[in-house]
Amino acid sequence: MVNNYNRVYNFSAGPAVLPVEVLETARDEMLNYQNSGMSVMEMSHRSKTYDTIIKTAEKDLRELINVPNNYKVLFLQGGAHLQFSMVPINLLKNGVADYIVTGQWAKKAYIEAQKYGKINKIATSEDKNFSYIPDCSNLDITPDADYVYICENNTIYGTKYKTLPNTKGKTLVSDMSSCFLSEPIDIAKYGLIYAGVQKNVGPAGVQIVIIREDLIREDLPSWCPTMLKYKTHADNDSLYNTPPAYGIYICGLVFKWLKKIGGLEKMKEINEQKAKILYDFLDSSKLFKGTVEPASRSLMNVPFITGSDELDKKFIEESAKKGLVQLKGHRTVGGMRASIYNAMPIKGVEKLVEFMANFEKENYKLL
């Protein structure tokens, strides 16, 4: 258990663990936010107090990842699934886009985009159940493609792009939902990035979009709903309608927490340390085996198996009794998955590896 709150080590892929310090601040401000006499949950999104909250959150996020001045930061709703539609609706001018399919979410985005134009699958790792990132150094980019789309970190399969695709000058769009703010980002390499915050940044319900201003179009089809236009939200500073106000407030607290610990360079260092502890154990284990090719391993999501469905089930049940929860793998991979996002303490990974080592000693002979 973690600290005095009797908290478990939560390895959920999302909604996921949040920093205890952030939760403590939210607790302390729950009933009376900064002498306003009310909770952030209760205040108008048009109030001066909330205006300060959302503007400070954007300012801190811009500072964390050095967002250039010609990019807009949007706090939206609808999750990644809505972005599967918003991206092609807003970015397709020629009606053509290239997609690299490296997992279930990229595949869903690829299928959804086909409703709006000619969508080409230019690379995929489906042949090995998405256990690797394909070579993207010399892709057959479509000459008139409006953009190239990737899911940068694959939550289900535990893979991560270590080198961005060579888009040959085409706009790069990235779904960063499960790796956002885990390491420094060079925003200028992308035309648009988006991330559901429920994995690494805040509670479910907030979607962050960072988009280069020249991609924000007015000349969209007449059938396009107002709420699906990036311009609607950019022109209104994410306040066209009532935003997910409390979720944005929590995100703002997480941004401040990240700045306090040393920013994304420090966060990357910590995440690499955590991942090394787990991957080193997997590489030396006689019982457990990682399912991802080493060159494509994610720092955030680590799937692994024993090779026995019966032992996998036993491991999940017994680990939960030890306060190591949400370790069941996605049904398309099976086995286990440890999501070790920013807020997962190093001690949590150490406790997991300690349990895995003991489990191996007791159960290896059963294979």
Image (cartoon, rainbow, N blue to C red):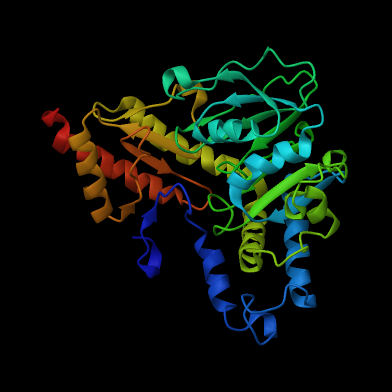
- Indicate left or right for 257 with 64 as reference: left
Q: Work out whether 235 lies above or below 114.
A: below
- Indicate left or right for 317 with 56 as reference: left
The number of callouts visible is 0
Image coords of residue 357 (percent x, y): 25, 38
Residue at 53% across / 36% down in the picture? 105
The N terminus - image quarter: bottom left
Residue at 16% across / 31% down in the picture? 364
Q: Work out whether 62 lies above or below 56.
A: above
Image coords of residue 189 (percent x, y): 76, 31
For the residue pair 33 and 118, the one nearer the viewer reads as 118
Q: Quadrant of residue 99?
A: top right
The C terminus - image quarter: top left
Residue at 60% across / 78% down in the picture? 29
Image coords of residue 318 (percent x, y): 21, 49
- Indicate left or right for 134 with 313 as reference: right
Camera sees residue 293 = yes
Image coords of residue 281 (percent x, y): 34, 32
Most distant residue in the left direction = 366
Q: Quadrant of residue 221?
A: top right
For the residue pair 254 and 138, the one nearer the viewer reads as 138
For the residue pair 284 and 140, the one nearer the viewer reads as 140
Q: Work out whether 65 lies above or below 36.
A: above
Q: Work out whether 176 lies above or below 41.
A: above
Residue at 82% across / 31% down in the picture? 93
Camera sees residue 358 = no
For the residue pair 196 and 233, the one nearer the viewer reads as 233
- Indicate left or right for 322 with 165 as reference: left
Most distant residue in the bottom direction = 37
